[in-house]
Amino acid sequence: MQEKAHEDYMRAFLYLQKKRGMLSQSELASYLGISKAGVSEMMHILSKKGLVKKAAYKPPALTKKGEALAKKMTFKHRLIEHFLASKLKMPAKKVHKEAEMLEHALSDDAAGRLYKFLGKPKKDPHGSPICP
Ligand SMILES: [Zn+2]
């Protein structure tokens, strides 16, 4: 399993957990466009890495470590979207795909510098908070 896929999952996790108050594997599967079996397998790997808590008869949840990673990835994603829209004048509907690729390449240091360079923006082009 690749680091990039983990990071995508963590970001999707945080998004759905915040939106619904809890996670369901089937919702995650449809959101990410993968099979339920694929989600179960990923949950297993992420829980081994200490990013997700899994207990019998309970919905999965992010651990503290998982939540920190998810927030960091969301921050990078939205920051890049803001940069692409505001500085490169890329249409808002195009920035998401681009940010999905770039978020994995941006170091924490560069992200922090970009955040300052952009004047610590509050919202991404879709209106979501840059700092989740
Ligand atoms: Zn996006």
Image: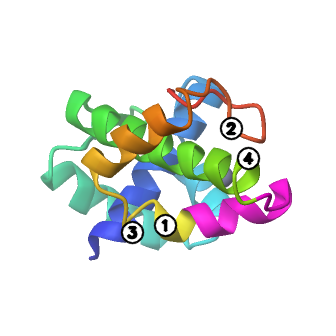
Q: Which residue is mark 4?
A: 86
| Three-letter amino acid code of the residue under disc 4 | Ser
Q: Give the label on residue 5, or none.
A: 3
Label 2: state its secondary structure.
loop
Q: Which residue is mark 2?
A: 124
Q: Is residue 78 magenta?
A: no
From the viewer's perspective, is residue 60 above or below residue 2? above
User: Would you say the magenta stretch is mainly helix, strand or loop?
Assistant: helix
- First of labels 2, 3 by sequence position: 3
Q: Position of residue 56 (x, y in %)?
A: 30, 38
Q: Is residue 93 magenta?
A: yes
For mark 3, does the 10 Å Cα neighbourhood hold few (<14), some (14 to 19), or many (20 or more) residues? few
Q: Which residue is mark 1?
A: 102
Instruction: Tell me how far mark 2 sits from mark 4, CA to CA.
Output: 10 Å
Mark 1 vs ligand 1: CB below 8 Å: no
For mark 4, does the 10 Å Cα neighbourhood hold few (<14), some (14 to 19), or many (20 or more) residues? some
| Three-letter amino acid code of the residue under disc 3 | Ala
Q: Nearer the viewer, mark 2 or mark 3?
A: 2
Q: Nearer the viewer, mark 1 or mark 3?
A: 1
Asked if the residue at tag 4 contacts the one at tag 3, i.e. Cβ–Cβ closer than 8 Å, the answer is no
| Three-letter amino acid code of the residue under disc 2 | Asp
Q: Position of residue 10 (x, y in %)?
A: 40, 49
Who is closer to the viewer here, 6 or 107?
Answer: 107
Who is closer to the viewer here, 112 or 26?
Answer: 112
Per the rendered image, the range of residues in magenta is 89-99
Who is closer to the viewer here, 46 or 26?
Answer: 46
